[in-house]
């Protein structure tokens, strides 16, 4: 199983970026998917999450600016980031809670992380 994130980059304050993260491999289904970020010298924090049914949750710092969505058919989660601020600068990681299928059994509650993508917002 692999989570491949892309879409990061360098943008000026007030600009926008769209991150995407696609899960691939022996996936039976995906429960929650989310985006976390980690800035230099800080811990990893939840940015936004979305359940398989589309219920979303956001960090207070990004409410009204970021939108998380997912395409269940493509096993992909997106993060639309608008009105970016310098304090949004961080390494962004995607996360997924998976059910893995093998020829003989299922594995529940499998927590996977993508490699991450850098977002840099200049002032």
Image (cartoon, rainbow, N blue to C red):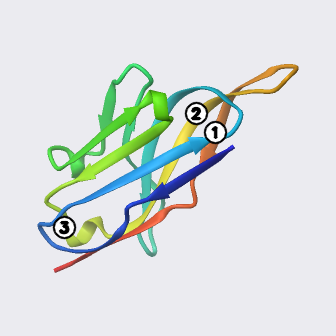
- Between residues 72 and 64, which one lies in front from this camera angle? 72
Given contact means CB atoms under 8 Å apart, are the residues at marks 2 and 1 in contact?
A: yes
> Which residue is pictured at 40% across the width and 50% down the height?
20
Q: Which mark is residue 111?
A: 1
Residue position for label 3? 85
- Between residues 68 and 73, which one lies in front from this camera angle? 73
Left or right: where 115 falls relative to 33: right
- Between residues 30 and 24, which one lies in front from this camera angle? 24
Q: Position of residue 5 (x, y in %)?
A: 49, 56
> Which residue is pictured at 37% across the width and 66% down the height?
8
Left or right: where 104 falls relative to 45: right
Res 26 quadrant in image: top right
Q: Which mark is residue 79?
A: none
Res 97 quadrant in image: top right
Q: Position of residue 34 (x, y in %)?
A: 44, 41
In the rendered image, the vertical position of residue 85 relative to residue 95, given as above or below = below
Q: Quadrant of the C terminus?
A: bottom left
């Amino acid at each position: 199983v692999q989570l491949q994130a892309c879409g990061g980059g360098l943008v000026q304050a007030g600009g926008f970026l769209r991150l995407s993260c696609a899960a691939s491999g022996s996936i039976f289904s995906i429960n929650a998917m989310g985006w976390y970020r980690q800035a230099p010298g800080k811990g990893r924090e939840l940015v936004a999450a979305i359940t398989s049914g589309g219920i979303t949750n956001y960090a207070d710092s990004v409410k009204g600016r970021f939108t998380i969505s997912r395409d269940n058919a493509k096993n992909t989660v997106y993060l639309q980031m608008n009105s970016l601020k310098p304090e949004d600068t961080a390494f962004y990681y995607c996360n997924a809670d998976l059910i893995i299928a093998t020829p003989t059994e299922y594995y529940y509650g499998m927590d996977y992380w993508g490699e991450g993508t850098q977002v840099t917002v200049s002032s």
